[in-house]
């Protein structure tokens, strides 16, 4: 993922992506939290609603109890205001129930509807009760009182009409009292509802009837009145019995029907409250469950999102820091001047790719610098080489001048010295001796001439010889042997040239001079007490060079002098003729052909001159075919 | 004027120069015995035998610089690093007048550096002067004593 980010997403986009991811995660967590809390809130609302319902239920019970109390008050006390209150609270209750009915579960609704019906029938019973009570009241207030006052009036009339006998009058008064007692008994009954008062009233009434019947037999004059009174008494009795019946009717209503309804309502409301309680319990349970569930969802999703965010931010951070650290390492290497510091490929175009480009430019510069440095080192080395060559050539020149001045002066000193001697001898008259010395002067001057020409020759080497061509050494040496035949014979030197000598590139006259020098050296030193002097020339190949050997069996050269012999004017021996320039010329010829010359010798066992010529490609091929 | 027997070591490769020297030495001091050594190798051998005490220490040494095999400088440094040979004065007598040769010889403790003169009488005068100068020196008391 980190690699993907590095290779495909721009740096800025990566940073934005991390912020966006963080924002998304935070928003998601907020949304989840909101959802969880909304759910908890909904459950809580449900719960609060249920508790409100239970409160309504309790109110209902209380109101029904109050209603019933008011009904009883009305029943027993007959206050109209109580009846009005009953109606009012009934209406209130109905309204509340209707309101509650609109928003409830079916089970609650059923119960509430039952309660409503019960309440309606209760109220109907109350309406009946009210009617009955009104009827009874009317009965007592109108009929009963009329009958009572009629009977009283008749008995008072009877009293006035009766004979003046005191016993009769007393009897009538007693009857009247008893009658009043009946009225009293009835009212007492209506007040207390004690049945004994009714029994007493009945007994008293019967007593009045019996006594009136007895009086009817004794008092003839007042039969009509007595009959009337008896008749009225009968009506009186019927009216109060009717009132009692009414009374009993509404008492039945209140005590049985309405009480039953009230009880039913209470029962239903209890049922309702138990229902609500169980509902609340289940709701509480569900709230608890859903809370736990919601919390676990919240925790899980939040931790999941946070870990996702951590992974994302780690990846993005790494995707930013890895290329930067790589670049840092690259730049560290680059600042050390490295020209091959590793620059990681970075395909996306952004700030880091710009940095990478800068690093690449830096590296290119470094490479250039390295190249320049190498070039400058090469130049310095070449310069040093040139300087050394110049120094050497200066030294050589100085050496040359020095040697030349010394060796040229020597014959001068000689000739001048001998001239002095000659002069002296002449003064002394020794002319013969003087003339003899003249030869010395001549020879030294001749020698000087020889030196001068040799030096001229030396100075020409490598300066004038630009005419380089292929030289077949086989042919060259054959010619040399032929031209030197006389000298070789006189020295008794056997000259052996091996076949298959290489073809080299060089200046023919110089190479010829070189071999002439070697041959003449061999002739000069051809002194061997044991065997006949021999000079053998052959060749081998070593790496890129032809090595030509010129081997003699002369006296040899000690190791100490093997280098010196190539120096200008250096002579190993003063005996043979020579200017000491020959080998210096040989060395210079070999150097000017890109080769070298050196000596291999063990004292007394001959000398080998080694000549090294570089192989030109064509020659190399030929030489290989030859082999 | 009494003459003692004196050996003079003439290290000189050029026969002509040697002849000149011998001529003037015999003219001026015929009693001096000249031992002429013609090249560096021979000179080294002789000096070694002097060092071995098999040959007597010469009174004076005339040393040319340009010699076959070993040159004058090498011979000089051998002489001046030997406890016996060092007592022998060495006059470098050469055609060279190069500063390089002079300074090298002096630093190798040459007792004298004289360039062979070019004039017709110069060679003889030089030999005379050298011999008469070294005649005045008392070094023979230790070197021959």
Image (spheres, coloured by chain):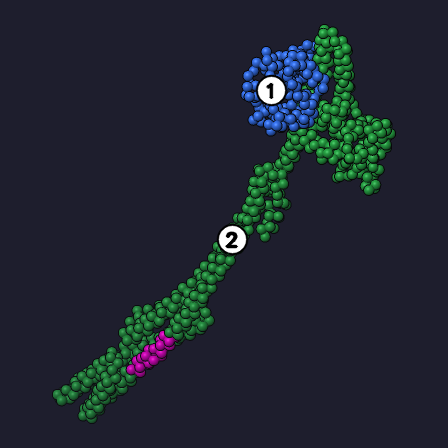
Chain colours: A green, B blue
Q: Residue at x 86, y 27 (%)?
A: A486
The residue segment tinted magenta is: A244-268
Q: Which picture quadrant has residue A132?
A: bottom left
Magenta stretch, main secondary structure, is helix
Which chain's residue wears label 1? B
Toward the bottom, the furthest residue is: A217
User: Which of A164 and A377 lies nearest the eye of the viewer?
Assistant: A377
User: Which of B116 and B23 lies nearest the eye of the viewer?
Assistant: B23
Q: Residue at x 34, y 77 (%)?
A: A259
Q: Give the labeled residue for mark 2.
A: A310
Q: Is residue A128 left or right of residue A622?
A: left
Q: Is residue A321 left or right of residue A584?
A: left
Q: Position of residue B45 (x, y in %)?
A: 65, 28
**Does A594 appear above or below A437?**
below
User: Which of A155 and A344 lies nearest the eye of the viewer?
Assistant: A344
User: Which of A402 and B25 lies nearest the eye of the viewer?
Assistant: B25
- Number of marks in picture: 2
Q: Is residue A616 visible?
A: no
Give the structural element (helix, strand or loop) at label 1.
loop
Q: Position of residue B89 (x, y in %)?
A: 59, 20
Q: Is residue A141 left or right of residue B39?
A: left
Q: Give the labeled residue for mark 1.
A: B59
Q: Residue at x 64, y 17 (%)?
A: B32
**Does A563 appear above or below B109?**
below
């Amino acid at each position: 993922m980190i690699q993907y980010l590095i290779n495909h997403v721009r740096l800025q986009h990566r940073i934005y992506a991390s912020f966006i991811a963080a924002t998304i995660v935070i928003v998601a967590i907020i949304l989840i939290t909101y959802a969880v809390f909304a759910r908890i809130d909904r459950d809580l609302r449900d719960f609060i609603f249920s508790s409100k319902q239970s409160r309504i239920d309790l109110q209902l019970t209380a109101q029904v109890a109050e209603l019933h109390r008011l009904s009883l008050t009305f029943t027993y006390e007959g206050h109209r205001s109580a009846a009005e209150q009953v109606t009012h609270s009934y209406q209130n209750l109905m309204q509340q129930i209707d309101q509650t009915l609109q928003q409830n579960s079916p089970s609650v609704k059923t119960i509430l509807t039952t309660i409503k019906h019960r309440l309606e029938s209760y109220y109907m019973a109350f309406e009946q009760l009210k009617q009955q009570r009104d009827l009874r009241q009317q009965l007592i207030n109108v009929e009963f009182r009329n009958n009572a006052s009629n009977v009283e009036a008749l008995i008072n009339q009877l009293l006035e009409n009766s004979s003046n006998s005191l016993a009769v009058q007393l009897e009538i008064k007693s009857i009247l009292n008893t009658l009043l007692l009946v009225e009293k008994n009835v009212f007492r009954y209506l007040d207390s509802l004690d049945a004994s008062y009714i029994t007493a009233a009945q007994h008293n009434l019967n007593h009045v009837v019996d006594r009136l019947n007895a009086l009817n037999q004794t008092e003839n004059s007042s039969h009509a009145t007595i009959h009337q009174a008896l008749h009225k008494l009968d009506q009186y009795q019927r009216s109060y019995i009717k009132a009692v019946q009414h009374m009993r009717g509404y008492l039945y209503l209140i005590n049985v029907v309405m009480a039953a309804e009230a009880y039913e309502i209470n029962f239903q409301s209890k049922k309702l409250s138990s229902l609500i309680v169980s509902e609340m319990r289940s709701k509480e349970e569900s709230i608890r469950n859903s809370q736990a569930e919601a919390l676990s969802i919240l925790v899980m999703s939040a931790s999941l999102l946070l870990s996702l965010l951590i992974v994302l931010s780690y990846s993005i951070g790494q995707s930013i820091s890895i290329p930067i650290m790589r670049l840092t390492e690259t730049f560290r290497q680059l600042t050390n001047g490295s020209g091959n510091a590793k620059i990681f490929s970075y395909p996306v175009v952004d700030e880091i790719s710009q940095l990478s480009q800068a690093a690449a430019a830096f590296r290119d510069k470094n490479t250039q610098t390295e190249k320049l440095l190498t070039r400058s080192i090469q130049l310095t080395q070449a310069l040093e080489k040139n300087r050394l060559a110049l120094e050497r050539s200066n030294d050589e020149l100085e050496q040359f001048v020095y040697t030349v001045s010394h060796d040229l002066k020597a014959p001068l000193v000689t000739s001048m010295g001998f001239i002095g001697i000659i002069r002296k001898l002449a003064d002394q008259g020794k002319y013969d001796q003087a003339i003899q010395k003249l030869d010395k002067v001549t020879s030294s001057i001749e020698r000087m001439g020889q030196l001068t020409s040799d030096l001229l020759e030396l100075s020409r080497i490598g300066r004038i010889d630009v005419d380089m061509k292929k030289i077949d050494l086989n042919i060259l040496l054959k010619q040399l042997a032929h031209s030197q035949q006389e000298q070789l014979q006189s020295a008794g030197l056997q000259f052996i040239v091996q076949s298959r000598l290489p073809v080299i590139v060089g200046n023919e006259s110089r190479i010829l001079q070189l071999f002439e020098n070697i041959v003449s050296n061999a002739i000069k030193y051809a002194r061997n007490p044991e065997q006949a002097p021999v000079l053998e020339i052959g060749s081998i190949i070593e790496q890129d060079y032809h090595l030509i050997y010129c081997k003699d069996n002369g006296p040899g050269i000690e190791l100490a002098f093997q280098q010196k012999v190539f120096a200008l004017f250096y002579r190993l021996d003063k005996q043979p003729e020579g200017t000491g320039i020959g080998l210096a010329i040989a060395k210079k010829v070999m150097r000017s052909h890109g080769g070298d010359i050196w000596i291999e010798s063990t004292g007394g066992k001959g000398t080998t001159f080694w000549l090294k010529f570089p192989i030109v490609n064509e020659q190399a091929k030929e030489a290989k075919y030859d082999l | 004027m009494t003459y003692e027997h004196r050996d003079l070591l003439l290290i000189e490769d050029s026969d002509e120069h040697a002849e000149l020297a011998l001529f003037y030495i015999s003219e001026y001091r015929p009693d001096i015995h000249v031992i002429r050594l013609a090249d560096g190798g021979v000179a080294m051998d002789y000096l070694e035998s002097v060092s071995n005490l098999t040959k007597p220490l010469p009174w004076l040494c005339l040393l040319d610089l340009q010699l076959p095999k070993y040159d004058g400088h090498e011979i000089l440094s051998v002489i001046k690093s030997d406890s016996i040979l060092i007592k022998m004065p060495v006059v470098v007598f050469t055609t060279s007048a190069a500063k390089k040769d002079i300074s090298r010889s002096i630093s190798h403790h040459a007792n004298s550096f004289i360039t062979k003169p070019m004039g017709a009488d110069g060679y003889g005068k030089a030999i005379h002067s050298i011999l008469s100068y070294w005649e005045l020196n008392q070094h023979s008391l230790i070197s021959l004593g």
